[in-house]
Amino acid sequence: MSNPSETKLRHYQVDALQGIMDAFADNDSTLLVCPTASGKTTIFVEAIKHFPIGRILILAHRQELIFQASARVKRMLGIDAEVEMGDAVAESSAVLGSRVVISTVQTQLAGERMRRFKPTDFRLCILDEAHHYAAPSFKRVLDYYRQNPDLKILGVTATPDRADEKALGAVFQSVAYANYQIIDGIEDGYLVPIRQRMVTVHGLDYSKISTTAGELNGAELRDVLEQEEHLHRFAQGIIEAAMDLGPGTLTPLVGLADAELQKAMAERLGFSAMKTTLVFTRFVHQAERLSEICNRWLHGCADWLCGKTPKDKREEMLKKYAAGAFHILCNVNVLSEGADEPRISVVVMAAPTKSRARYSQQVGRGLRPLAEIADALSHAETREDRLALIAGSGKQTCSILDFVGNSGRHHLMTTADILGGKPLDGAVSRRARELLEDGEEDPAAAAEQAQREAEAESLAELMAEKRRKDDEDRRRNLRVAANYSITEADPFGGTPITPWKEKPATMGKMASEKQMAFVRRFYPKVEHPELLTARESAQLIVEKMKEWKNKPIGPSDGMARILKQRGYDPDQMTFAQAKAEIGKIAIAEGWERRA
């Protein structure tokens, strides 16, 4: 046993640890949710201090996670943890063995190796990347150790995505802490800010790809991503991002011979100044070809690995990558979890996804500050001090590179979707993506603006709906008042007119628009012509016609105006008299007849 080093917990880590212990007071199992690069390993190793009696079992599913946990246990607790993985065999006896055992789920299942250990020897079981434990195979290992009624189980994850939430509810009785998000880490100065870069690839079309189990269909996506033309455009975009050049900057160099190209590339930036870049691909051939084409641009700058890469070769490759022997590492979803390389400052999403959890995991690989300032960040007194440390470091931001094509109906993830506790609404997410594609580099700003626009639109819709309802209420009130008046007042009241008897043919029919217009003009005392029946309005029109027939018709308004201008009194003239006089005026004044 070596001497442990003192670790200063960040404020949210203190809250998370307290949440874990509070949850264990009432539950046997609980879940800790913290974003990638926020120090989840530090939190769960610190929790071990609260279990002085009994062995501790840490389960993970990748060797990178095993090595990280082992190193952190030794540094923080001064304990040499034993590893049960592959050829490494831990002491099964609680008396002879280390107090901390770290193992992979796959090893536990292989040949039932879990049965080498007594469940009753363990007091705490920690599940790293706990969102996997809803799967039957993972659950089988957990059920074996749960035979110990005194066992406490702590799950740790950054991505309990929506698809897993219900399933994880069957594994964990409570959530100890889930109050810290990626955006909080960035704003508090513990994670580096994100710079979103969207590169349009002409001809890239995802729209015809179907969806299988909530994700883009693999076979159909392969046909798109492995097209030679797209691979070359992706590779150029990756090189430009790694060299911090704008999209299309290297296009003039495409036709150069190899020697000329290498010289031109060295003159532009040089090998050593390339940014450490992690590329996520969906397929092995895609990763291999992208690495190959990147190396055509600049010899020795790229390499690739996949799940079948031998462990010793993978370890050696990651060591060279961390040391800067090459700068671009293409991987087939191998490093979505467990990749802890602070020098990564460009993350390339060459595998479009509809999964918020997967996108969040992959983006998180680039959010760690440089190792040389990590300790200073934890000891900094204020948020402003931490932000200044990052701003003054060699890694001020992390660039996330997405390749844009025609996504059609698919809602593909961008960084705007992961900066918060809950997924963005579909319409808001699409608008945020449009803003990013239009040149906005701050995903938080894009998400905020899209949200504001959605809220403004929603408010406008609410106001329109309120106006519609108010208008309905006014019409409803008008109808009530009219019904009341029509029962009390007869439209023929005060006149000698006797209403006609309604006939079956017109029963229930209301006045037409023309009938109502006539009534409004010649019967101004009728307050609501729209309440008249067709028969009532017809009777009023007939009565007015009778009145005109029995009374000489005077000149029209136009005729009266002409006559008045020339000294006549139109009120003393009939229509025929006025017409005759206007005819004389037309001859005298030489009016021209209209064609």
Image (spheres, rainbow, N blue to C red):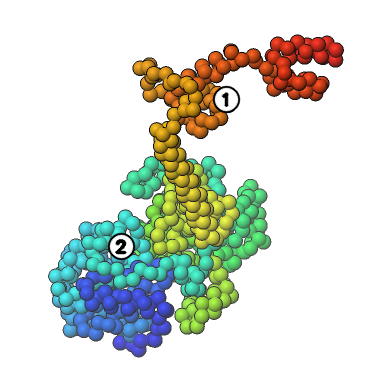
The amino acid beneath tag 2 is His
Give the side of residue 447 with respect to residue 588, left or right.
Answer: left
Is residue 110 at least partly visible in the picture? no
The residue shown at (51%, 16%) is 542
Give the side of residue 358 with respect to residue 513, left or right.
Answer: left
Give whichever of 281, 142 is nearer the camera.
142
The residue shown at (37%, 48%) is 215
The image quadrant where one finds the C terminus is: top right
Q: Which numbered circle lies on residue 131?
A: 2
Q: Where is residue 204? Give x, y as percent.
A: 50, 43
> If you read the primary sequence from the N terminus, does the residue marked by circle 2 or circle 1 appear first?
2
Task: Examine the rendered structure and indicate whether residue 537 appears above or below residue 138.
Answer: above
Give whichever of 325, 248 is nearer the camera.
248
Toward which corner of the image does residue 162 lie, by quadrant?
bottom left
Query: Which residue in the structure is indicated by mark 1?
Result: 522
The amino acid beneath tag 1 is Phe
Give the side of residue 400 with respect to residue 136, left or right.
Answer: right
Task: Examine the rendered structure and indicate whether residue 1 appears above or below residue 42.
Answer: below
Q: Element type at marker 2?
A: helix
Q: Element type at marker 1?
A: helix
**Mark 2 crowdedness (10 Å alpha carbons): few <14, some 14-19, many ≥20:** many
The residue shown at (47%, 83%) is 379
How far apart in space, not on screen, are marks 2 and 1 (Cα)? 80 Å
Q: Which residue reaches farthest bottom?
A: 3
